[in-house]
Image (cartoon, helix red, strand yellow):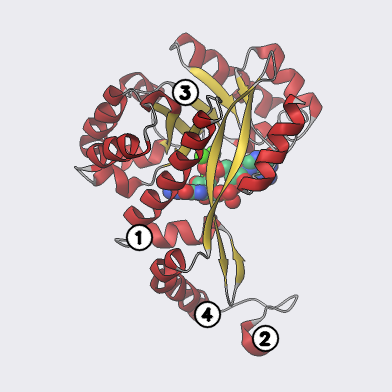
Amino acid sequence: RATRGGEEVRGYVPSMGQIFLRRFQLVTQFRQALEDGQVSVHYQPKVSLPDKNVVGVEALVRWVHPEFGRVNPDEFVPAVEATGLVGALTSFVLDQALDRVRRWLDEGLEMSVAVNLSVRSLADEDFAEQVADALARHGVPARLLTFEITESAVMADPQRALPILGELHDLGIELAVDDFGTGYSSLAYLRRLPVDQVKIDKSFVFGMSTDLGDLAVVRSIVELGHSLGLSVVAEGVEDDSSRDQLEAMGCDVAQGYLISRPLAEDRLEAWLLARTA
Ligand code: C2E
Ligand code: CA
Ligand code: CA
Ligand code: CA
Protein backbone atom coordinates (compact mmCIF):
# COMPACT_ATOMS: atom_id res chain seq x y z
CA ARG A 1 0.00 0.00 0.00
CA ALA A 2 2.96 2.30 -0.47
CA THR A 3 2.36 5.17 -2.83
CA ARG A 4 4.72 6.25 -5.55
CA GLY A 5 7.92 7.95 -4.49
CA GLY A 6 8.15 5.93 -1.29
CA GLU A 7 5.69 8.19 0.50
CA GLU A 8 4.39 6.54 3.64
CA VAL A 9 0.68 5.85 3.97
CA ARG A 10 -1.04 5.50 7.33
CA GLY A 11 -0.96 1.92 8.48
CA TYR A 12 1.83 1.11 6.05
CA VAL A 13 4.80 -0.53 7.69
CA PRO A 14 8.08 -0.39 5.77
CA SER A 15 9.83 -3.70 5.29
CA MET A 16 13.31 -4.44 6.64
CA GLY A 17 14.59 -4.09 3.08
CA GLN A 18 13.12 -0.61 2.78
CA ILE A 19 14.53 0.47 6.13
CA PHE A 20 17.91 -0.85 5.12
CA LEU A 21 17.73 0.90 1.75
CA ARG A 22 16.81 4.23 3.32
CA ARG A 23 19.61 3.91 5.85
CA PHE A 24 22.02 3.10 3.03
CA GLN A 25 20.86 6.17 1.10
CA LEU A 26 21.23 8.40 4.16
CA VAL A 27 24.78 7.23 4.77
CA THR A 28 25.91 7.47 1.15
CA GLN A 29 24.30 10.91 0.68
CA PHE A 30 25.43 12.51 3.92
CA ARG A 31 28.68 14.06 2.75
CA GLN A 32 26.99 15.60 -0.29
CA ALA A 33 24.18 16.82 1.95
CA LEU A 34 26.73 18.68 4.09
CA GLU A 35 28.16 20.33 0.98
CA ASP A 36 24.73 21.16 -0.44
CA GLY A 37 23.57 22.95 2.69
CA GLN A 38 20.86 20.40 3.56
CA VAL A 39 22.35 20.01 7.04
CA SER A 40 22.13 22.77 9.63
CA VAL A 41 22.40 23.29 13.36
CA HIS A 42 19.57 24.31 15.64
CA TYR A 43 20.12 25.56 19.18
CA GLN A 44 18.11 24.84 22.31
CA PRO A 45 18.51 27.27 25.22
CA LYS A 46 19.38 26.13 28.76
CA VAL A 47 18.36 28.29 31.71
CA SER A 48 19.65 28.39 35.26
CA LEU A 49 16.89 27.47 37.66
CA PRO A 50 16.87 29.98 40.44
CA ASP A 51 17.36 33.12 38.34
CA LYS A 52 16.27 31.88 34.89
CA ASN A 53 19.28 33.33 33.11
CA VAL A 54 20.16 31.77 29.77
CA VAL A 55 23.40 29.95 30.51
CA GLY A 56 24.01 28.43 27.11
CA VAL A 57 22.59 26.45 24.25
CA GLU A 58 22.82 22.89 22.98
CA ALA A 59 23.67 22.45 19.30
CA LEU A 60 21.41 19.87 17.62
CA VAL A 61 21.93 18.82 14.03
CA ARG A 62 19.09 18.98 11.46
CA TRP A 63 18.87 17.44 7.98
CA VAL A 64 16.25 18.39 5.40
CA HIS A 65 16.60 15.71 2.74
CA PRO A 66 15.37 16.55 -0.80
CA GLU A 67 13.35 13.32 -1.03
CA PHE A 68 12.60 12.29 2.57
CA GLY A 69 12.06 15.76 3.99
CA ARG A 70 13.08 16.31 7.59
CA VAL A 71 15.09 13.36 8.84
CA ASN A 72 15.29 12.90 12.59
CA PRO A 73 18.83 12.87 14.06
CA ASP A 74 17.82 9.79 16.06
CA GLU A 75 17.68 8.06 12.66
CA PHE A 76 20.61 9.47 10.71
CA VAL A 77 23.16 10.10 13.48
CA PRO A 78 23.40 6.39 14.40
CA ALA A 79 23.65 5.53 10.68
CA VAL A 80 26.42 8.08 10.18
CA GLU A 81 28.13 6.95 13.39
CA ALA A 82 28.45 3.46 11.99
CA THR A 83 30.61 4.82 9.16
CA GLY A 84 33.78 6.85 8.88
CA LEU A 85 31.67 9.98 8.35
CA VAL A 86 31.08 10.86 11.94
CA GLY A 87 34.21 13.02 12.01
CA ALA A 88 32.67 15.14 9.24
CA LEU A 89 29.44 15.48 11.25
CA THR A 90 31.21 16.46 14.46
CA SER A 91 33.50 18.97 12.79
CA PHE A 92 30.58 20.51 10.90
CA VAL A 93 28.54 20.99 14.07
CA LEU A 94 31.55 22.15 16.08
CA ASP A 95 32.48 24.69 13.42
CA GLN A 96 28.96 26.12 13.24
CA ALA A 97 28.66 26.20 17.03
CA LEU A 98 32.00 27.94 17.58
CA ASP A 99 31.23 30.45 14.84
CA ARG A 100 27.95 31.23 16.65
CA VAL A 101 29.75 31.70 19.98
CA ARG A 102 32.37 33.91 18.33
CA ARG A 103 29.71 36.22 16.88
CA TRP A 104 28.03 36.43 20.29
CA LEU A 105 31.38 37.39 21.83
CA ASP A 106 31.74 40.11 19.21
CA GLU A 107 28.36 41.46 20.38
CA GLY A 108 29.56 41.40 23.99
CA LEU A 109 27.62 38.27 24.95
CA GLU A 110 29.31 35.35 26.73
CA MET A 111 27.29 32.27 25.93
CA SER A 112 28.42 28.69 26.05
CA VAL A 113 27.53 26.01 23.53
CA ALA A 114 27.20 22.27 24.06
CA VAL A 115 28.02 19.85 21.24
CA ASN A 116 27.04 16.17 21.28
CA LEU A 117 29.90 13.75 20.79
CA SER A 118 29.59 10.33 19.26
CA VAL A 119 31.41 7.25 20.51
CA ARG A 120 33.52 7.30 17.39
CA SER A 121 35.06 10.67 18.22
CA LEU A 122 36.29 9.20 21.47
CA ALA A 123 38.24 6.60 19.53
CA ASP A 124 40.10 9.21 17.45
CA GLU A 125 43.48 9.83 19.09
CA ASP A 126 43.86 13.25 17.45
CA PHE A 127 40.45 14.43 18.54
CA ALA A 128 41.57 16.79 21.34
CA GLU A 129 44.13 18.36 19.01
CA GLN A 130 41.48 18.94 16.33
CA VAL A 131 39.25 20.60 18.92
CA ALA A 132 42.08 22.80 20.20
CA ASP A 133 42.71 23.90 16.59
CA ALA A 134 39.04 24.69 16.06
CA LEU A 135 38.89 26.77 19.25
CA ALA A 136 42.00 28.70 18.20
CA ARG A 137 40.72 29.22 14.65
CA HIS A 138 37.48 30.72 15.96
CA GLY A 139 39.09 32.56 18.86
CA VAL A 140 36.73 30.99 21.39
CA PRO A 141 37.89 30.26 24.96
CA ALA A 142 37.64 26.56 25.83
CA ARG A 143 35.42 27.25 28.85
CA LEU A 144 32.60 28.31 26.51
CA LEU A 145 32.50 24.83 24.95
CA THR A 146 30.81 21.81 26.51
CA PHE A 147 30.83 18.30 25.10
CA GLU A 148 27.90 16.03 25.90
CA ILE A 149 28.78 12.34 25.91
CA THR A 150 26.58 9.43 26.81
CA GLU A 151 27.65 7.01 29.50
CA SER A 152 27.41 4.17 27.01
CA ALA A 153 29.79 5.98 24.64
CA VAL A 154 32.41 6.09 27.37
CA MET A 155 31.75 2.56 28.53
CA ALA A 156 32.03 1.18 24.99
CA ASP A 157 35.81 1.49 25.26
CA PRO A 158 36.88 3.25 28.46
CA GLN A 159 40.57 2.56 27.85
CA ARG A 160 40.46 4.70 24.73
CA ALA A 161 37.85 7.21 25.79
CA LEU A 162 39.27 8.18 29.18
CA PRO A 163 42.60 9.64 27.98
CA ILE A 164 40.79 11.66 25.27
CA LEU A 165 38.27 12.98 27.81
CA GLY A 166 41.19 13.89 30.07
CA GLU A 167 42.87 15.86 27.28
CA LEU A 168 39.65 17.71 26.45
CA HIS A 169 39.13 18.52 30.11
CA ASP A 170 42.72 19.75 30.43
CA LEU A 171 42.06 22.15 27.57
CA GLY A 172 39.38 23.71 29.81
CA ILE A 173 36.38 22.26 27.97
CA GLU A 174 33.39 21.31 30.12
CA LEU A 175 32.22 17.72 29.93
CA ALA A 176 28.67 16.54 30.55
CA VAL A 177 27.33 13.01 30.86
CA ASP A 178 24.22 12.92 28.66
CA ASP A 179 21.14 10.72 29.12
CA PHE A 180 22.22 10.01 32.68
CA GLY A 181 20.31 7.21 34.37
CA THR A 182 19.70 5.18 31.21
CA GLY A 183 23.03 3.35 31.02
CA TYR A 184 24.09 0.18 32.75
CA SER A 185 27.30 1.56 34.07
CA SER A 186 28.08 1.91 37.72
CA LEU A 187 27.88 5.12 39.65
CA ALA A 188 31.45 4.44 40.72
CA TYR A 189 32.52 5.19 37.16
CA LEU A 190 31.16 8.69 37.38
CA ARG A 191 33.83 9.48 39.96
CA ARG A 192 36.57 8.39 37.60
CA LEU A 193 35.34 10.46 34.67
CA PRO A 194 36.70 14.01 34.36
CA VAL A 195 33.19 15.46 34.07
CA ASP A 196 31.59 18.70 35.23
CA GLN A 197 27.89 18.08 34.60
CA VAL A 198 25.28 15.36 34.50
CA LYS A 199 22.19 15.65 32.35
CA ILE A 200 19.19 13.78 33.73
CA ASP A 201 17.61 11.85 30.88
CA LYS A 202 14.33 13.31 29.66
CA SER A 203 12.48 10.01 30.13
CA PHE A 204 12.65 10.53 33.93
CA VAL A 205 11.89 14.24 33.72
CA PHE A 206 8.75 13.63 31.59
CA GLY A 207 7.33 11.37 34.26
CA MET A 208 8.40 13.17 37.41
CA SER A 209 5.18 15.11 38.01
CA THR A 210 2.98 12.00 37.77
CA ASP A 211 5.20 9.04 38.66
CA LEU A 212 6.76 8.72 42.11
CA GLY A 213 9.40 6.33 40.78
CA ASP A 214 10.59 8.84 38.19
CA LEU A 215 10.51 11.57 40.80
CA ALA A 216 12.72 9.47 43.07
CA VAL A 217 15.21 8.84 40.25
CA VAL A 218 15.41 12.54 39.43
CA ARG A 219 15.88 13.43 43.08
CA SER A 220 18.65 10.91 43.59
CA ILE A 221 20.52 12.02 40.46
CA VAL A 222 20.41 15.63 41.70
CA GLU A 223 21.75 14.54 45.08
CA LEU A 224 24.39 12.25 43.62
CA GLY A 225 25.56 14.91 41.15
CA HIS A 226 25.85 17.52 43.87
CA SER A 227 27.63 15.19 46.26
CA LEU A 228 30.25 14.66 43.53
CA GLY A 229 30.53 18.42 42.99
CA LEU A 230 28.84 18.32 39.58
CA SER A 231 26.34 20.68 38.08
CA VAL A 232 23.00 18.99 37.32
CA VAL A 233 20.98 19.72 34.18
CA ALA A 234 17.45 18.41 33.54
CA GLU A 235 16.45 17.94 29.91
CA GLY A 236 12.90 17.43 28.64
CA VAL A 237 11.30 19.97 30.99
CA GLU A 238 7.84 20.37 29.47
CA ASP A 239 5.63 21.72 32.25
CA ASP A 240 5.63 24.22 35.09
CA SER A 241 5.20 21.65 37.83
CA SER A 242 8.32 19.70 36.80
CA ARG A 243 10.27 22.94 36.56
CA ASP A 244 9.11 24.00 40.04
CA GLN A 245 9.94 20.61 41.54
CA LEU A 246 13.40 20.65 39.93
CA GLU A 247 14.03 24.10 41.31
CA ALA A 248 12.92 23.00 44.79
CA MET A 249 15.33 20.04 44.62
CA GLY A 250 18.20 22.35 43.76
CA CYS A 251 18.69 21.19 40.17
CA ASP A 252 20.95 23.78 38.54
CA VAL A 253 19.85 24.07 34.92
CA ALA A 254 16.70 23.28 32.92
CA GLN A 255 16.26 22.60 29.22
CA GLY A 256 13.07 21.62 27.44
CA TYR A 257 10.06 22.65 25.42
CA LEU A 258 8.70 24.65 28.38
CA ILE A 259 11.63 27.03 27.94
CA SER A 260 12.08 26.65 24.19
CA ARG A 261 12.28 24.07 21.42
CA PRO A 262 15.53 23.87 19.47
CA LEU A 263 15.56 26.93 17.19
CA ALA A 264 17.19 27.87 13.90
CA GLU A 265 19.76 30.62 14.32
CA ASP A 266 17.56 33.55 13.32
CA ARG A 267 14.72 32.40 15.56
CA LEU A 268 17.12 31.92 18.46
CA GLU A 269 18.31 35.50 18.05
CA ALA A 270 14.71 36.72 18.19
CA TRP A 271 14.02 34.55 21.24
CA LEU A 272 17.08 35.89 23.07
CA LEU A 273 16.14 39.48 22.25
CA ALA A 274 12.58 38.98 23.49
CA ARG A 275 13.89 37.62 26.80
CA THR A 276 16.28 40.46 27.51
CA ALA A 277 13.83 43.15 26.36
P1 C2E B 1 20.07 14.34 23.03
O1 C2E B 1 21.50 14.77 22.97
O2 C2E B 1 19.61 13.64 24.24
O3 C2E B 1 19.24 15.67 22.75
C1 C2E B 1 18.04 15.99 23.35
C2 C2E B 1 16.86 15.68 22.45
O4 C2E B 1 15.66 15.93 23.18
C3 C2E B 1 16.79 16.57 21.21
O5 C2E B 1 16.23 15.79 20.16
C4 C2E B 1 15.81 17.66 21.66
O6 C2E B 1 15.17 18.30 20.59
C5 C2E B 1 14.85 16.84 22.48
N1 C2E B 1 14.16 17.64 23.50
C6 C2E B 1 14.63 18.69 24.20
N2 C2E B 1 13.70 19.14 25.07
C7 C2E B 1 12.61 18.36 24.91
C8 C2E B 1 11.31 18.34 25.53
O7 C2E B 1 10.99 19.13 26.40
N3 C2E B 1 10.45 17.36 25.10
C9 C2E B 1 10.78 16.47 24.14
N4 C2E B 1 9.86 15.57 23.76
N5 C2E B 1 12.00 16.46 23.53
C10 C2E B 1 12.91 17.39 23.92
P2 C2E B 1 16.85 15.79 18.69
O8 C2E B 1 17.31 17.17 18.32
O9 C2E B 1 15.88 15.09 17.82
O10 C2E B 1 18.16 14.89 18.85
C11 C2E B 1 18.07 13.53 19.14
C12 C2E B 1 19.42 12.95 19.45
O11 C2E B 1 20.26 12.95 18.29
C13 C2E B 1 20.19 13.72 20.50
O12 C2E B 1 19.73 13.37 21.79
C14 C2E B 1 21.60 13.25 20.23
O13 C2E B 1 21.82 11.98 20.81
C15 C2E B 1 21.59 13.10 18.72
N6 C2E B 1 22.19 14.31 18.10
C16 C2E B 1 21.61 15.49 17.78
N7 C2E B 1 22.51 16.35 17.24
C17 C2E B 1 23.70 15.69 17.25
C18 C2E B 1 25.04 16.04 16.83
O14 C2E B 1 25.33 17.14 16.36
N8 C2E B 1 26.01 15.07 16.99
C19 C2E B 1 25.74 13.84 17.54
N9 C2E B 1 26.76 12.96 17.67
N10 C2E B 1 24.51 13.51 17.94
C20 C2E B 1 23.50 14.40 17.81
CA1 CA C 1 22.68 16.02 24.31
CA1 CA D 1 20.02 13.71 26.39
CA1 CA E 1 19.49 10.83 23.52
Q: Earlier in the sequence, mark 1 or mark 3?
A: 1
Residue in view at x 47 percent, y 23 percent = 197
> Which kind of residue does numbered mark 2 sit on?
Ala
Element type at mark 4: helix
> Which kind of residue does numbered mark 3 sit on?
Gln
* Relative side of 58 to 121, left or right: right
**Which residue, given by chain and number where applicable, does mark 4 sit on?**
18
Q: Nearer the viewer, mark 4 or mark 3?
A: 3
Residue 197: mark: 3
Coordinates of residue 30 in the picture (x, y in percent): 42, 67
Coordinates of residue 245 in the picture (x, y in percent): 73, 19
> Which kind of residue does numbered mark 4 sit on?
Gln
Residue 82: mark: 1
In this view of the protein, which residue sits in the foreground, 170 or 16? 170
Q: Nearer the viewer, mark 4 or mark 1?
A: 1
Residue 2: mark: 2
The response on whether ligand 2 sits within 8 Å of label 3 is no
In this view of the protein, which residue sits in the foreground, 266 or 55? 266
Q: Is residue 225 above or below residue 235?
A: above
> Which kind of residue does numbered mark 1 sit on?
Ala
Residue that protrudes farthest toward the bottom in the picture: 4
Residue that protrudes farthest toward the right in the picture: 240
